[in-house]
Image (tube, grey):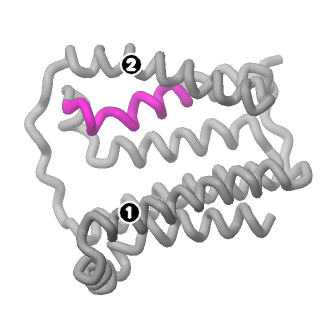
Amino acid sequence: MQLLIAGLVLWWGAHVFKRLLPAQRVALAGKLGQGPAKGVVAATLLIAVVLMVLGYRQMDFIAVYQPIRGIGHLAVLLMYIAVFLTGVGAVGGRLFSNLRHPMLTGGILWAFAHLLVNGDLASILLFGGIGLWAGAQMLLINRSEGAWERPAAGSVRKDVKLAVISLVIYGVIVGVHFALGHNPFLGTYS
């Protein structure tokens, strides 16, 4: 459990550093340079992910709640939507002008989908921790940046292209789950 919690603390810390301690973030960039400072944050995030994965896989299964039977189909659909939303900001399609935080919204959906089908303590810590982080990050961004200026709406064609790309990425994610010994299509389908 300690590795998982340490990973979550590093994840949260690296992401909120700029928002909660802006002077220290500027000082770090001034001392190291902008690129190396970003590299430190990226390395911290990589370490956080490794710790979260190792911690999650090492934890004993401790049931906290029983997922709802038959909810797996909804979780699979929400996961695809989460993958799609994480790319909305990058493609600049029609949806980009309607969502202030598409990637973070995708993160919340990702967490929620996993919590629908996983009721154990490790899952609650990991997915709940990331979902709470995404929500907190939205609030911090809104507070520090103020009112949102909507970007110009892009084309629906870009959103359709993203939907196809998201299917491919989703397939890769499913493949990684299989490679790690977990079939994402077995959870609470009956």
Q: Secondary structure at mark 2?
A: helix
Q: Residue furthest left?
A: 152
- Tag 1: amino acid: Gly
Residue appearing at x 80%, y 48% in the figure: 57
Residue nearer the viewer, 110 or 189: 110
- The rendered magenta stretch, by its main secondary structure, is classed as helix
- Tag 2: amino acid: Ile
Within the magenta stretch, is there residue 38? no
The C terminus lies in quadrant: top right
190 is higher (above) or lower (below) than 133: above
**Residue 5 percent location from the top left of the image:** 70, 67
Q: Secondary structure at mark 1?
A: helix
Residue appearing at x 90%, y 49% in the figure: 61
Residue nearer the viewer, 189 or 11: 11
Q: Nearer the viewer, mark 2 or mark 1?
A: 1
Within the magenta stretch, is there residue 90? yes
- Magenta range is 79-92
Quadrant housing residue 162: top left
Quadrant housing residue 6: bottom right
- Left or right of 91 in this view: 106: right
The residue beneath circle 1 is: 39
The residue beneath circle 2 is: 165
Q: CA distance from mark 2 to mark 1?
A: 28 Å
**Residue 122 percent location from the top left of the image:** 78, 53
Which of pointers 2 and 1 lies earlier in the amino acid sequence?
Answer: 1
